Image: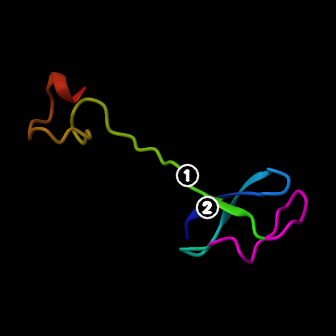
């Protein structure tokens, strides 16, 4: 199950919730002010490559270690 980020339109409180895939927030309420239907926010995500070339996120070549992969 993904973690979604929500923001209350009434008080602006931001919070995260473990929800079923596609949850809109319609059945949730703000934990700070109890206002119904917080807005689901678009969250960014991070990725991490492995240093040293092997397993790096370099997709421009098949080499496992080069100056462009570091």
| Residue bearing mark 1 | 43
Look at 55% across and 70% down and name the residue there: 1
Left/right of residue 15 with respect to residue 68 in the rendered view: right
Q: Is residue 18 above or below residue 5?
A: below
As helix, strand or loop, the secondary structure at mark 1 comes to loop
Q: Distance between the Cα atoms at labels 1 and 2?
A: 7 Å
Look at 48% across and 48% down and name the residue there: 45
- Residue 6, given in percent of the width and then of the height, sits at 69, 58
**The image quarter in which residue 24 lies:** bottom right
Q: Is there CB contact under 8 Å for labels 1 and 2?
A: yes
How many marks the image carries: the answer is: 2
Left/right of residue 13 with respect to residue 62 in the rendered view: right
Q: Nearer the viewer, residue 16 or 38?
A: 38
Query: Does the stretch in magenta take in 43?
Result: no
Q: Is residue 52 above or below residue 59?
A: above
Of pointers 1 and 2, the one earlier in the residue sequence: 2
Residue furthest right as drawn: 33
- Residue 11, given in percent of the width and then of the height, sits at 85, 52
- Residue 65, given in percent of the width and then of the height, sits at 15, 29
| Residue bearing mark 2 | 4
Q: Nearer the viewer, residue 20 or 67?
A: 20
């Amino acid at each position: 199950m993904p973690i979604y980020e929500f923001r209350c339109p009434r008080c602006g409180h931001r919070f995260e919730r473990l929800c079923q895939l596609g949850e809109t927030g319609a059945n949730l309420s703000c934990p700070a002010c109890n206002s119904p239907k917080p807005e689901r926010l678009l969250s960014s995500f991070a990725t991490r490559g492995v240093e040293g070339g092997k397993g790096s996120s370099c997709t421009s070549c098949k080499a496992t270690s080069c100056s462009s992969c570091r």
